[in-house]
Image (tube, rainbow, N blue to C red):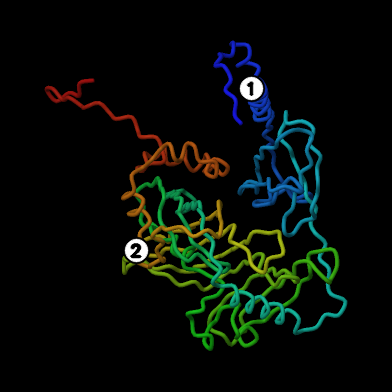
């Protein structure tokens, strides 16, 4: 039986007491958020002192981590100090460092990893590893990742920068390549030049380790059924503690009788058959311009792909792609021009959750600059993007564009000159 209680009003002190625990909780959460500490530093090779780009920096036992930028620099926010950080890079020994202060930037030096040769070095072993990696890609090719990618391209003619393009793509990828992209934002700077590379990103967006649509009987790719027919392989060693695990480092080169020329190095995880990193050089790269008088000579294209490390999954999403082209541009009656185009693509915010976006496959008719100009420029997007901030464009490149009065959305506009007034043949100030 329910009994009615007389209605009454709680005095203000009672209300305060009721919400006091909640207030303390909110104050505690605010204190915790304020207690977060930002660490910054640089990771270098212990012997050469060279910066180590895309080295992993992580808090062991957590998902908190980051990678170094192209200059080996990193920033990482941690909950509190002291904290232990784990630093790792494919060809270097992992190291841990206990951090007690964030007052100064950290300098971390990693020693080069010991390369161990298997006790029994069988000539067919590297071919077996590459074939296993190929079969692994075949089985997992349909595994799809959705995320974003930051792309930067710098063109230099006779060592002078002439183009600077930066874009952020929404990207769809798999364990072998980029499947499709859609432009989220772009910006550029450029000066008048004899040539522009407005579709260079097509090499990044079209290149892959494996293509199931290609005729396997004629494929010249390293990861194909024809590896023994087309390539010479050498196992340089295994980066790891012993020969039963770790990452195998294998150099490759097309056989002399094969017209297509390629050479490089591939790293394969022995336990998972996952391709960890891939570097390849095409010393006889062919290309052309829309000017029939211009020709590329001594062209060489360098390609690098790195996949996210960690975990025991058979495949992993892309983390980095780099493309570098060096060539001489010749034209009758003119001095050859030394052309260098370099680009890198950093993948982030990746997951397997499908996104309903119009991802487009790369086409040879694509023109990056046209696509950038067609997209409304959002300065706030670039000012507040942490991925862009962590790898700023080189100061000497930006300053070179500013001095040359470059056009575009990336550099400061030149101060407009006042109209010149001429009276009686004299310029009036």
| Residue drawn at 59 percent across, 63 percent down | 304
Residue occupying the far left of the picture: 424
Q: Badge 1, how many Cα within 10 Å: few under 14, some, many 20+?
A: few
Of residues 300 and 19, the one drawn nearer to the viewer in this rendering:
19
Q: Along the horizontal axis of the image, is 239 left or right of 26? A: right
Please identify the quarter of the rendering in which residue 425 is found.
Answer: top left
In the image, which is nearer the foreground, mark 2 or mark 1? Answer: 1
The residue to which callout 2 is attached is 333
Please identify the quarter of the rendering in which residue 336 is found.
Answer: bottom left
Residue occupying the far front of the picture: 1
Quadrant of the image containing the N terminus: top right
Instruction: Residue 242 in the image: state x and y as whole percent.
Output: 86, 67
Q: Mark 2 near mark 1, Cβ–Cβ under 8 Å?
A: no
| Residue drawn at 34 percent across, 48 percent down | 375
Nearest to N terminus: mark 2 or mark 1? 1
Q: Along the horizontal axis of the image, is 186 left or right of 130? A: left
Instruction: Residue 148 in the image: state x and y as whole percent.
Output: 50, 53
The residue to which callout 1 is attached is 23
| Residue drawn at 64 percent across, 70 percent down | 264
Instruction: Residue 131 in the image: state x and y as whole percent.
Output: 66, 80
Q: Is residue 243 above or below residue 193?
A: below
Residue occupying the far right of the picture: 119
Q: Is residue 117 above or below residue 12?
A: below
């Amino acid at each position: 039986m329910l009994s009615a209680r007389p209605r009454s009003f709680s005095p203000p002190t009672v209300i305060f007491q009721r919400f006091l625990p909640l207030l303390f909780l909110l104050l505690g959460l605010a204190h915790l958020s304020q207690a977060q500490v930002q660490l910054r530093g640089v990771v270098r090779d212990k012997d050469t002192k060279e910066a180590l780009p895309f080295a992993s920096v992580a808090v062991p036992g957590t998902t908190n981590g980051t990678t170094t930028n192209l200059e080996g620099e990193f920033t990482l926010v941690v909950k509190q100090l002291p904290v232990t950080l784990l630093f790792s890079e494919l060809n270097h020994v992992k190291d841990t460092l206990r951090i007690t202060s964030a007052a100064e930037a950290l300098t971390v030096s990693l020693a080069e990893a010991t390369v161990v040769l298997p006790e029994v070095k069988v000539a067919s072993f590297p071919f077996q590893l590459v074939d296993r990696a190929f079969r692994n890609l075949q089985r997992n090719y349909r595994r799809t990742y959705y995320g974003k990618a930051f792309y930067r391209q710098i063109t230099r003619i006779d060592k002078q920068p002439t183009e600077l393009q930066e874009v952020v793509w929404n990207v769809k990828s798999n364990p072998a390549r980029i499947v499709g992209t859609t432009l989220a934002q772009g910006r550029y700077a450029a000066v008048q030049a004899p040539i522009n590379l407005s579709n260079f990103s097509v090499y990044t967006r079209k290149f892959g380790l494996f293509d199931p649509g290609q005729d396997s009987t004629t494929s010249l790719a390293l990861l194909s059924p024809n590896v023994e027919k087309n390539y010479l392989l050498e196992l340089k060693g295994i980066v790891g503690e012993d020969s039963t695990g770790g990452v195998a480092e294998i150099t490759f080169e097309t056989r002399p009788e094969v017209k297509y020329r390629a050479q490089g190095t591939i790293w394969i995880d022995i336990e998972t058959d996952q391709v960890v990193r891939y570097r390849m050089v095409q010393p006889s790269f062919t290309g052309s311009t829309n000017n029939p008088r211009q020709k590329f000579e001594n062209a060489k294209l360098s390609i690098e792909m790195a996949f996210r490390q960690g975990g025991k999954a058979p495949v992993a999403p892309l983390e980095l792609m780099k493309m570098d082209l060096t060539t001489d541009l010749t034209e009758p009656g003119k001095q050859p021009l030394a052309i260098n185009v370099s680009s890198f693509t950093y993948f982030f915010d990746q997951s397997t959750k499908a996104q309903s976006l119009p991802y487009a496959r790369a086409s040879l008719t694509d023109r990056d600059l046209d696509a950038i100009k067609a997209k409304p420029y959002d300065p706030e997007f670039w000012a507040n993007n942490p991925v862009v901030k962590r790898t700023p464009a080189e100061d000497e490149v930006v300053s070179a564009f500013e001095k040359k009065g470059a056009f575009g959305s990336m550099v400061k506009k030149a101060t407009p000159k006042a109209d010149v007034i001429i009276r009686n043949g004299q310029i009036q100030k």
